[in-house]
Amino acid sequence: MKNDWKNKVAIVTGASSGIGAATARHLVKQGLNVILVARRLERLLDLKEHIEAMGGKAKVIVADLSHETDRERVFESVQADGGADVLINNAGFGWYGYYNEMPWETAREMLEVNISAAVHLTSLFLPEMQKRGRGHIINIGSISGSIPSQGIALYSASKSFLDAFTTALYRETQRTQVHISVARVGPVLTEFCETALQREKGGHVPTERMGVTAEHVAQRIWQLLLHPKRVIYIPRWLSVTPWVELSFGWLEDLIGPLLLRRQQT
């Protein structure tokens, strides 16, 4: 299998842990150089040290992607070093509980990180990729975008947005050398659920003990770079999820509120 990505540059947001960190490590193994973007400097430096010990190259950019100025600073820094060939919009977080109990500050931050950051960074990097005639933007979505569920109202909505945004851009960029994809990911064994619990009024996410590893997600993302397509499901069997909502959404309407109430007690 031909690897055309050697020595190319990939930006990974939310790179300090979980899917982002695993993806960065995996891409370095395949010969790419990575730009690590997240808020936690110490974690980013640890990952950079690990990557360099592997013989790879990594650059750290500390940024809070809920802020527009930080997103612009990331773009300017990357462009100053020659630009990027891959953008992986992975940064995001969740919150579990009744939406009417969700603090507005948490909701506002989720909208900025889960939606605005991906849209803004795409608006910055996509024109540059098109000018150079190559590139791939991958948005890390979720199956919850296809199955809106109790307890994750805003998170589900943010992932539904990414699905629609990616699909539209995919169709706009057909017949070009720039690819747009979304990875609809199921439960993953990361800090995601723990972080959701730590936020104000957050609850236990029911899937916190389920899921695939972040390394498995990273491998599938690499395959997506080798074989571009609009959407992939991780794991693959979750490709049935759109049909689950169409066929059994009425059942979740009935039992969903009971599951959330039980989880919150």
Image (spheres, rainbow, N blue to C red):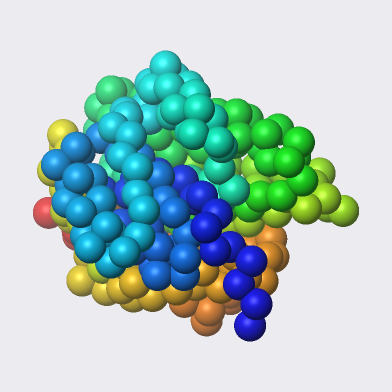
Given residues 234 and 205, the one toward you in this image is 234
Please determine whether, in this image, residue 223 is positioned above or below residue 175.
below
Q: Residue at x 31, y 28 (%)?
A: 64
Given residues 184 and 129, the one toward you in this image is 129
x, y (%) of residue 229?
Answer: 69, 65
All told, the count of numbered labels is 0
**Quarter-wise, where is residue 112 in the image?**
top left
Q: Is residue 67 left or right of residue 88?
A: left
Can residue 70 be seen in this snapshot? yes
Q: Residue furthest top?
A: 69
Q: Residue furthest right?
A: 175
x, y (%) of residue 23?
Answer: 39, 61
Q: Residue at x 68, y 34 (%)?
A: 128
Q: Is residue 238 left or right of residue 261?
A: right
Q: Residue at x 76, y 36 (%)?
A: 131
Given residues 78 and 65, the one toward you in this image is 78
Please determine whether, in this image, residue 209 is positioned above or below residue 7.
below
**Quarter-wise, where is residue 63 in the image?**
top left
Q: Residue at x 49, y 34 (%)?
A: 81
x, y (%) of residue 236?
Answer: 53, 79
Can residue 187 be seen in this snapshot? no
Can you say which quadrant of the picture contains the C terminus? bottom left
Can you say which quadrant of the picture contains the N terminus? bottom right
x, y (%) of residue 70?
Answer: 39, 22
